[in-house]
Image (cartoon, grey):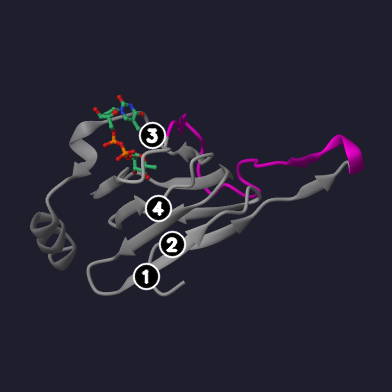
Amino acid sequence: MQVRNCNLIQLPTIQDGIDGTISVAENPKQIPFEIKRVYYIYNLANQEAKRGMHAHKKLEQVLFCISGSFLLYLDDGTKQEEMLVYKPNVGVYLGPCLWHIMTNFSSNCILMVLASGFFDETDYIRDYNEFRNYVANK
Ligand code: T46
């Protein structure tokens, strides 16, 4: 990964033949924080769907695309990167202070997120210029 505060997390995966596959995420083995919140996003069939467009000051998250695919754009204030997220057993760790945008959702996309904290609107930076100033002054 080129941007800071970000890496891929591979989950141990058990292939159960005709009975399917199990992937497991545990703290602290794979998830580097205590999980306080799990949320998931679905009904993403609209081609115009666009999520994110913000950064978090402190929150850490791991994003899993457990069905379908989407395009993830990341910006750490200096470097930018884009990746297709599509493997149910590979999560994307997003540390604090990463501007992130999600687009190009496949119609069957389900995005599941493990988060280090409860929902807190004061942790969001929703203005890009404010984000650039925030990371520049850190
Ligand atoms: C990220 C992507 C994947 C809550 O009330 N509780 C929650 O836990 C969340 C996540 C959202 N909300 C409310 C707050 C807003 O009124 O749902 C609305 C949309 O929330 P948000 O702008 O956070 O939605 P996304 O999908 O743009 O972003 C969220 C995460 O914030 C983001 O970090 O990676 O999901």
In three-dimensional space, the C-alpha distance between marks 4 and 2, rounded to whole angstroms, equals 21 Å
Residue 104 placed where, x, y %?
Answer: 40, 52
Cα separation between marks 3 and 2:
17 Å
Q: Residue at x 77, y 48 (%)?
A: 13
Q: Does 98 appear in magenta?
A: no
| Residue that carries the numbered disc 3 in the rendered image | 117
Which amino acid does the dot numbered 2 rest on? Cys
Check the image and report above or below for 40 versus 92: above
Upstream in sequence: badge 3 or badge 2: 2
Q: Position of residue 99 (x, y in %)?
A: 27, 57
Disc 2 target residue: 6
Q: Residue at x 47, y 71 (%)?
A: 1
Q: Vertical placement of 29 versus 40: above or below? A: below
Asked if the residues shown at circle 3 and circle 2 are in contact, with their CB atoms under 8 angstroms apart, the answer is no
Q: Earlier in the sequence, mark 1 or mark 4?
A: 1
Mark 3 belongs to which amino acid? Answer: Gly
Q: Is residue 53 left or right of residue 133?
A: right
Query: How dense is the environment of label 2, judged by Cα within 10 Å: few (below 14), some, or many (20 and up)?
Result: some
Amino acid at pointer 1: Glu
Quarter of image, ligand 1 = top left
User: Would you identify the image quadrant in which residue 22 lies?
Assistant: top right
Residue range corresponding to the magenta coloring: 17-43
Q: To which residue does mark 4 refer?
A: 104
Marking on residue 40: none
**Label 3: how many Cα within 10 Å (few below 14, some 14–19, many 20+):** some
Cα–Cα span, label 1 and label 3: 25 Å
Whole-number angstrom distance, CA of label 1 to CA of label 4? 15 Å
For mark 1, give the secondary structure.
strand
Q: Quadrant of residue 44?
A: top left
> Quick one: 137 or 130, which is closer to the camera?
130
Q: Position of residue 65 (x, y in %)?
A: 54, 46
The tag earlier along the polypeptide, 1 or 3, is 1
